[in-house]
Image: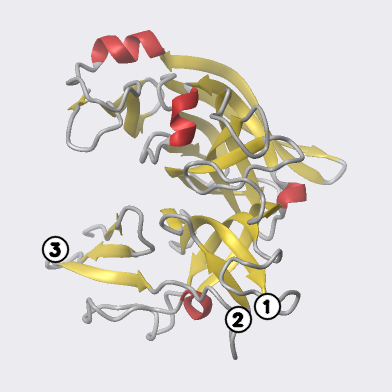
Amino acid sequence: VSPTIYAMSNAINQFDASILRADPTTGAIQTFYNLEEPPRECSAGVEQAIIAPFTLMKSFALDPASNDIYVTWSGYVCNCSQADCIDGSSDGFDFNVGVSRLDTSNNECVLLSDNYAKASWNHCTTVVATLTNGCSINNGQDVGGNCIDPRTNTSVTLSDSGFAVARSELTGQPQFFVSMLVNSYPSSTAGNAESSTNEVWVVNMGGSPETTQKNIDPVSVNAAFSDSNIQDAGTIQLRLDEQSFAPVGMCRTAYDAGIFCQDLKAENSSGTEFISVSNSTEFLSASQLNETCFVEDTDLNLPTVATGLAVAWPDIVYFGCFPSYAGVGNFS
């Protein structure tokens, strides 16, 4: 049986994002999902207003058990039932990072022939988990438009491509692994980031910021990434149990720090599931990354990053590398 291949197309610094599908019989590329920009203000029938500093959708992944399509997104969200949401001028807009499921059963959402029509974000997607919120649009913002939380003097950047879906070992429900860049600032309103950490966050279906497990395998990376729009530098690949699709291992690229792999196990603490990490291995160090990847000099002054991760378990890793500049780099 020929596989069905999906891909995502993003227009940088715009909302436009499409899910593409290769027809398993003919190989023809079809626009499977093409979402319109969500409303920025409340009006009749609008439940949420959303403002995305850059592209709202960051990455997508298939549920291995159901083939449902999930996407990660980040932006400023205002609930119309709770505030007067007027194009970013209201205190009601809070920064959110979330996971949504695409409605692939509605013919008004799925586009198999008309490549120009757009589906409604409000009507064709359903939020299934949120990882962070509570930072107002009126607070300071970093260069990427992410909110700098004055309570912690940190911002979070959702890594493009850093998304994987498994199944909870305890409940059997979808479980989401998300790569995040956590940036620390000297103050909440000014200055460049003093430090940045790449880490994995895990949230189950229906989860909230309070139930999100953070700080999984944190790795220090160059703080310059906090002020740059870098794609595909935090890729996640999971090793799943063949029967339950529960996560048993993970490898990930961590920007300029290299590639890291570890064993995963679901634990139960007073009815709350959490993922424990063991046998963490630095599969590729930062120095090895620089030695392996010969790249041309650029004027961006950014380190070389590992990207494009694929894993042949248990001991072969394939990856790409580039100096944070599209079109320049090698595959290793």
Are there few (<14), some (14-19), or many (20+) residues within 10 Å of tag 3? Answer: few
**Residue at left 63%, top 56%?**
137
Q: Position of residue 200 (x, y in %)?
A: 57, 35
Position of residue 313 in the picture relative to residue 89 (left or right): left
Q: In this view of the protein, can residue 146 be seen by the observer?
A: yes
The image position of residue 139, as x and y in percent, is: 66, 49
Q: Tag 1: Cα neighbours inside 10 Å, few (<14), some, or many (≥20)?
A: many
From the image, tell me which residue sits under label 3: 27
Which residue is at the far front?
A: 190
Residue 56 vs residue 183: left or right? left
SS category of the residue bearing label 2:
loop
User: Which amino acid type is marked by label 1?
Assistant: Cys
The circle on residue 42 is 2
Mark pair 1, 3: CA separation: 43 Å
Q: Quadrant of the C terminus?
A: top left
Q: Which residue is mark 1?
A: 80
Query: Does residue 234 sit above or below 6 in this rendering?
Result: above
Mark 2 touching mark 3, by CB under 8 A?
no
In this view, the mark in front (2 or 3) = 2
Q: Is the N terminus in the top left, top right, bottom left or bottom right quadrant? A: bottom left
Residue 225 place in picture, x, y as percent: 44, 30
Q: Are the residues flagged by discs 1 and 3 in contact, CB closer than 8 Å?
A: no
Residue at the image position 69 percent from the left and 35 percent from the top = 153
Q: CA distance from mark 1 to mark 2?
A: 6 Å
Give the camera-side residue of 27 and 222.
222
Position of 250 with respect to 310 (left or right) is: right
Judging from the image, what secondary structure is the residue with disc 1 in? loop
